[in-house]
Each structure stands twice: as C-alpha cells, then as structure tokens.
Image (cartoon, rainbow, N blue to C red):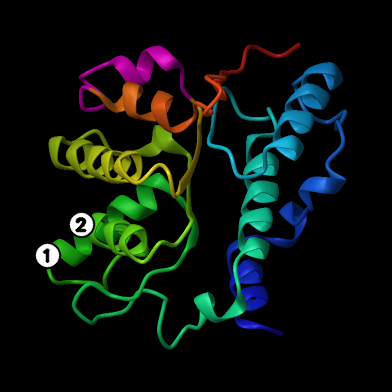
Amino acid sequence: MSNRSDYYLSVVPEPDRVRLADLKPNDQSYMSPETQGKLIKIMQNDPTGGYALLGPSGWSKTTFLSALFREAVCRHPDYLFDYCHRTFNNTLGGGYTPVVMIDASRLMDQIERHKYHDGPVPIVTVNKIERMAADGIHFTVILDEFEKLKKSETRMIWSYDILNACNKARHLCQFIMAGNLKKADLKDVNQFLEGTFRRIEELTTTKEGKTHFWELGEKQ
C-alpha cells in the first residue's frame, strides 16, 4: 500500500471507512433521513469546505468527519504522507502532515507533553500550520470530540492558537470540527477562550457567505 493509504487506514477504524460519494441517509442515526440527505448533498457539492457539527452522540458526526477526511487524503499526492519526512517527530518543528484528524483532547495532550519535553512534536502545531501556508499547501485540520478538552487556561489558549493559525491561513485551510456541545458552550468564556466561537464561524463560512456551522437537535 502507499504511504497515503497506510496513513488513512491507521487513522480511521474499519466501521467508519466510507467514501463521501457513497454516503446515504442511515436509519440508525438520530438525525432524520431528510436532514441527513440535505447535509450529505452539501458536503458532496463542497468537499473542500469547512464544517462544524455540534450535537449529541448518535447524530452521524463521526461518519461525516471520516468521509471528509478520506476525501481530503485522496486529494493529496502520496509523497506528502512520507513518514520519513512529513509525519511528526522529535526534530525541531517536526515534519508536517497535510491532512490531520484527531480528537481535540488528544491533540492537547500531545502539546502538553511536548511543552514539558516528554513527547514528540504534536501532529499539528501553529508552527506547522504556518509552514504549510508558506509552502502553499492546501491542508485539512479535523478536530473531533471538541467537548472533551480539559478546561484549563493553558488548553483554552492552545486550542485557540490552533484555530487562530488556521483562520490566518484560511485561504489554504479546510477546518472541520465536531463535538457534543452547543454554540452557547463555545461562547462561554469559562470553557473556551473569547473569540473561539468567532474563529470557528469564520472557518466554516464559504466565500459566498453560507455557513456550515450546524447545531443539531434532540432525537427526532
């Protein structure tokens, strides 16, 4: 298999491996088939767009993220996923990976360990985002389980810094996130740094002004 295929298989478990083009409404989801069909069509028509999916478990968020992740990986040439040169490592700054899907809390754990000299360079950092932008790389950052960030001041700052770096490079950045929370939570300064909501809103708004920042509801 190619480096790109190896990378995809290492990130996405078998039950979640689905092509965006093959997505169809699933009757196991709490989301109505009509709403699923509408969102799937939007994503299929705009596979490079930014998306935020907020809502309870069981609303197909992980399925959507996995399909968008596969689409993003397939857009890039294989050499960008060369483990010897691009994946994160212990060298200064590390290599960068152009498509990343990771739980937000796990990324914060990586950042914390690295800052205290107890781990490798995280898979995505402000420095890596800036380097990809400088290299003209169209990159994708997907953060799942955003609600599981430990609400410490330092982690609030680190998560905001990642969002802010993505926003500065948004002409090259596809940002996607999901979480079991509401928009009001993202505006709560006791949970997230002020400006977090605004950055996510900017990263999920199309050039035409359409917003893919969706708050899903209760079981239908």
Q: Secondary structure at mark 2?
A: helix
Q: Which residues are magenta?
A: 181-194
The residue singled out by tag 1 in the image is 116
Residue 18 x, y percent position in the rendering: 78, 53
Q: What is the quadrant of the N terminus in the image? A: bottom right
Residue 126 x, y percent position in the rendering: 25, 54
Q: Residues within 10 Å of mark 1 (few under 14, many from 20)?
A: few
Q: Name the side, left or right, on which 120 lies relative to 118.
A: right
Residue occupying image coordinates x 39% and y 46%:
104
Residue occupying image coordinates x 60% and y 44%:
48
Disc ID at residue 151 = none
Q: Is residue 23 above or below residue 101?
A: above
8 or 167, nearer to the observer = 167
Residue 164 x, y percent position in the rendering: 27, 39
Residue occupying image coordinates x 24% and y 33%:
151
210 or 57, nearer to the observer = 210
Residue occupying image coordinates x 26% and y 70%:
121
Residue 198 x, y percent position in the rendering: 33, 22
| Tags 1 and 2 touching, CB below 8 Å | yes
Q: Quadrant of residue 166?
A: top left
Specify the amino acid type for callout 2. Glu
The residue singled out by tag 2 in the image is 112
117 or 139, nearer to the observer = 139
Considering every residue shown, the one lying at the far bottom of the view is: 84
